[in-house]
Image (cartoon, rainbow, N blue to C red):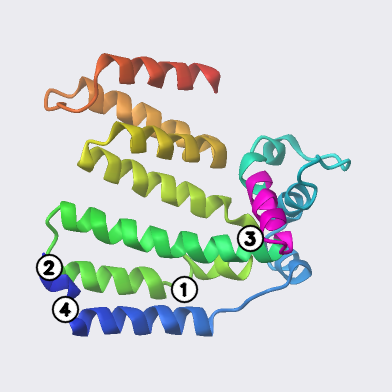
Amino acid sequence: MNSFFNNKNINILYISLFFFFLSNKYFLLPESLHYGAADGYFYNIIAENFPGFPREEINFHYAQRFLIPYFIGFLSKIFSLSAFLMFRIVAVLLILYILVLFIEINKRLKIKPEIIFISSCILVLHPYLFRFYLATSTIIIDLFFILSFLGIIKSITDKNRINLYLFIFIGLISRQTSLAFLIAITFIFISKNNKFLKYKDLFFNIIYLQCH
């Protein structure tokens, strides 16, 4: 599988990333709200008010996702940057990390190197996947959801329970639809071929489901 990392493939992937970042739109907050990221208004308010809480009323389905924008507000204070800029920096880091996870998962599944290379370039250059979240970075909660999905897959392939619960937690604080991950993990537990998950994992799974 190391043939994926030959100089030609790596250089083309780097060029694809460079083209992606260079050619993308980067909206300011008012523009991002206008072009479909209305949710980002509330997430930005949450981040800006760290370590306090917004006095403005926040819709409940945004408020229950407050941990991620609140953490971004924490980072913005640590690095003395605006909350909006910190959203964008985190968006870039998430995109790169998602790409790394995607490649690692494909390698573990023994996908052919040329298929990994082509699919990675498609992932980077796809007009709708990463570009929108980079342009309107305040709604990167969706990127955290994608990250949790890939992280759960990699944790299962690596048989790493600590990372599994970490990525489940990331999914739960990003989107409530991540409950589907817990249901899927329950099915893995009852599978005849399961040699990874134990009864305590099923117990924690049930607790998570009950709490939501």
Which quadrant of the figure has residue 25? bottom right
Which residue is denoted by mark 1 in the rendering? Answer: 127
* Amino acid type of the residue tagged 1 in the rendering: Pro
What type is the residue that disc 2 sits on? Asn
Which badge, 3 or 2, comes first in the chain's sequence? Answer: 2
Rate crowding at label 1 as few (under 14), some (14 to 19) or many (20 or more) other CA atoms within 10 Å. Answer: few
Q: Is residue 114 visible?
A: no
The vertical placement of 46 against 30, above or below, is above
Number of other residues with Cα within 10 Å of mark 4, as a class: few under 14, some 14 to 19, many 20 or more: few
Q: Is residue 99 above or below residue 198?
A: below
From the image, tell me which residue sits under label 3. Answer: 87
Q: Please state the horizontal and vertical placement of residue 67, each as a whole percent of the image.
A: 63, 40
Of callouts 2 and 1, the N-terminal one: 2
Give the dominant element type of the magenta stretch: helix, strand or loop.
helix
Using the numbered discs, state the Cα–Cα distance from disc 2 to disc 1 in whole angstroms: 29 Å
Q: Position of residue 196 (x, y in %)?
A: 19, 28
Residue for badge 4:
6
* SS for dot 4: loop
What residue sits right under mark 2 in the picture? 2
- Frontmost residue, 94 versus 58: 94
Residue neighbourhood size for the residue with mark 2, other residues' Cα within 10 Å, grouped as few (<14), some (14–19), many (≥20): few
The amino acid on which the numbered mark 4 sits, given as a three-letter code, is: Asn
Which residues lie in the magenta part?
70-83
In the image, farthest residue toward the right: 55
Three-letter amino acid code at disc 3? Phe
